[in-house]
Image (cartoon, rainbow, N blue to C red):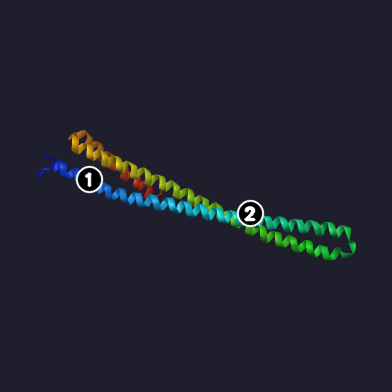
Amino acid sequence: MLFRSGDGHTSSIAMFTAIIATVGALFGYMGGATQANAGLYKNNAAIKKTEASNQWNYYQAKSSKQNLSELAMELTPAKKEFYQDEIKRYKGEKAEIKAAAEKLEAESKHWDEQSDEQMHQHHRWAQATTVLQVAIAMAAIALLSRKKWLEYVMYGAGAIGVVVGGLAAFHI
């Protein structure tokens, strides 16, 4: 009979399997959460990049207007003072637009870095979950075969899975 009362071997493997399955479920949840976060952060990066692109287009439009004012100033000397004021205004506006565009680009870069970090964590959680699944499979084989060395493999795989999960938890 496989499950005799008092069979420490069977009980310890069953307890190990239950614990590792629970830890694996938690790791799986964290893997999914970090993957979702990575997608959200990448979306935020794309939005900021688009906003920065819009600002650079606006900057280019102001540059074109400034260039036209510079040309008009040369062509109509009677309105030189008016066009000088226009050129000065466009230069000031361009400086503000440039600062806004650069800020948006920095925000986009920040969101990209956050996304990359989340994906790294996701991979760690996925690695940990996979190793724990291997440990659970080894537990089943150890129970069926009654091979002590498979039990050691099972415990070793479980320990490695927990360590890799710890690396994910500590962002390593």
Q: Secondary structure at mark 2?
A: helix
Residue 138 spot, x, y in % from top left:
25, 38
Residue 119 spot, x, y in % from top left:
45, 47
- Residue assigned mark 1: 16
* Residue 73 circle label: none
Q: Is residue 9 above or below residue 38?
A: above
Q: Quadrant of residue 91?
A: bottom right
Of residues 147 and 93, the one drawn nearer to the viewer in this rendering: 147
* Residue 53 circle label: 2
Residue at screen point 52% across, 56% down? 44
Spatial separation of the CA atoms under disc 1 and disc 2: 55 Å
Dot 1: few (<14), some (14–19), or many (≥20) neighbours within 10 Å? some
Q: Is residue 149 above or below residue 45?
A: above
Dot 2: few (<14), some (14–19), or many (≥20) neighbours within 10 Å? some
Residue at screen point 44% across, 50% down? 118
Q: Is residue 66 left or right of residue 168?
A: right
Instruction: State which tag comes first along the sequence, 1 or 2.
Output: 1
Residue 89 spot, x, y in % from top left:
75, 64
Q: Is residue 72 left or right of residue 133?
A: right
Residue at screen point 30% across, 42% down? 133
Q: Amino acid at mark 1?
A: Phe
Q: Is residue 29 above or below residue 142?
A: below
Q: Amino acid at mark 2?
A: Ser
Residue at screen point 37% across, 43% down? 127
